[in-house]
Amino acid sequence: MQATAKAHTNIALIKYWGKRNESLILPTNNSLSLTLDGFYTETTVHFSEYLEKDRFFLDNKKVVGVPLNRVTSFLDLVRSLAGKENLFAEIRSVNKVPTAAGFASSASGFAALAAASSRALNLNLNEQELSRLTRQGSGSACRSVYGGFAEWQQGSQLDGADSYAVQIASEDHWDVRMAALVLSAEEKDVSSREGMKRTVDTSPFFEGWVNSIPADLKTIKEGISSRDFTKVGEVTEANCLKMHATTLGATPPFTYWHHSTLLVMQAIQSMRKKGIPAYFTIDAGPNVKVLYLPEFEDIIKNELQALPGVKDVVLSRAGKGITYK
Ligand code: ADP
Ligand code: DP6
């Protein structure tokens, strides 16, 4: 009763920011992402009759407290689907991505955990079922089941049966790339979970955010289908700015941006004025991701590395969906 799975992170181009049901993790809007081959998690889950509780090792260190509880609650779902409520597991996971720094470690982490644990208990889930299960570990993780571009359909059913991701285009459809800029690899103060809750509960800008999503999705899907980089880049950057604007209206107000985040955003906008096509997006953390085309890779890497506050630049192509060992 053991399985190992690898899942890549995904970065949303149209963001998931808001829940309509917190325990089932049901979103207030559809979102759309690009899976990256540069960042991933590999997880082995071993269920054993000899264990009296779950044990979780992340990067070879034993994990306790909230991250362990999140893993255990998620495994409870998998156990109940398999009718094996009394079987505990040892989970060993390696993150090739900084943890809790806005690089979507939770996305690759829960996608790998869902895939490995469901396979270890012989659940035989198809991609849609796996995405729906993964969603209940961490919302954005449901998109990491797929390679390339994936859309999480929010669904309308109360039990979440129709809330899962689907693939929009595979990793072979279009060679667009993403540079991840490491400005700070420290854990953030406000988790994405807490940040989106505060925004939904208190930000007067939240309604405007939700209402703007259908038009952004229509534009980005047209752009992906016709491989129109300007169209995809412009809507990606605008959508990110709208999401971050909602946090400034929350009570108490907050922002994920650091001084260096703003410097990078401005640098990217001036790169475009010089004729270098590049667009940024930012998640629940200070780090910036930059969407670009392969022919501009060298120049973009050099320009980004030279910016003040940039500790590292990791380049990534579109990545694959879940794989098993
Ligand atoms: P991030 O931006 O890295 O996704 P979050 O605060 O959204 O930050 O999520 C980080 C949390 O995700 C961690 O505290 C932990 O609970 C969970 N997580 C990260 N990696 C893994 C993993 N490999 N397996 C299980 N859970 C993980
Ligand atoms: C800003 O998926 O980490 O990265 O569902 O509470 O686990 P939970 O939240 P999470 O939020 C991700 C927010 C985001 C945008 C996105 O990935 O779509």
Image (cartoon, rainbow, N blue to C red):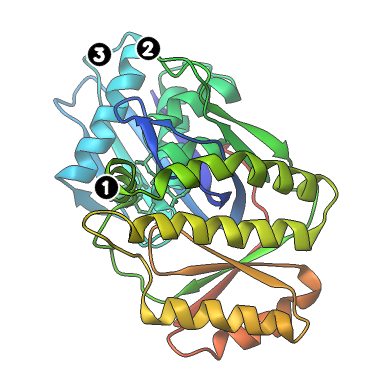
Q: Image check: 71 left or right of 316?
A: left
Mark 2 or mark 1: name the one nearer the start of the chain. 2
| The image quarter in which residue 28 lies | top left
* CB under 8 Å between discs 2 and 1: no
Cβ of disc 3 within 8 Å of ligand 1? no
Q: Which part of the image, by quadrant, shows the C terminus?
A: top right
Residue 258 percent location from the top left of the image: 36, 76
* Residue 280 seen in the figure: yes
Q: Nearer the viewer, mark 2 or mark 1?
A: 1
Q: Which mark is residue 85?
A: 3
Q: Image check: 82 left or right of 265?
A: left
State the residue position of label 2: 82
Residue 270 percent location from the top left of the image: 65, 84
The correct choice, above or below, for 299 with respect to 317 in the image is below
Callout 2 environment at 10 Å: few (<14), some (14 to 19), or many (20+)? few
| The image quarter in which residue 272 lies | bottom right
The amino acid sitting under disc 3 is Glu
Q: Image check: 253 left or right of 154?
A: left
Mark 1 or mark 3: name the one nearer the start of the chain. 3
Give the Cα separation between the discs numbered 2 and 1: 31 Å
The amino acid sitting under disc 2 is Ala
The amino acid sitting under disc 1 is Glu
Direction right: furthest residue = 226
Q: Nearer the viewer, mark 1 or mark 3?
A: 1
* Residue 172 seen in the figure: no
Q: Which mark is residue 194?
A: 1
Residue drawn at (41%, 52%) of the image: 105
* CB under 8 Å between discs 3 and 2: no
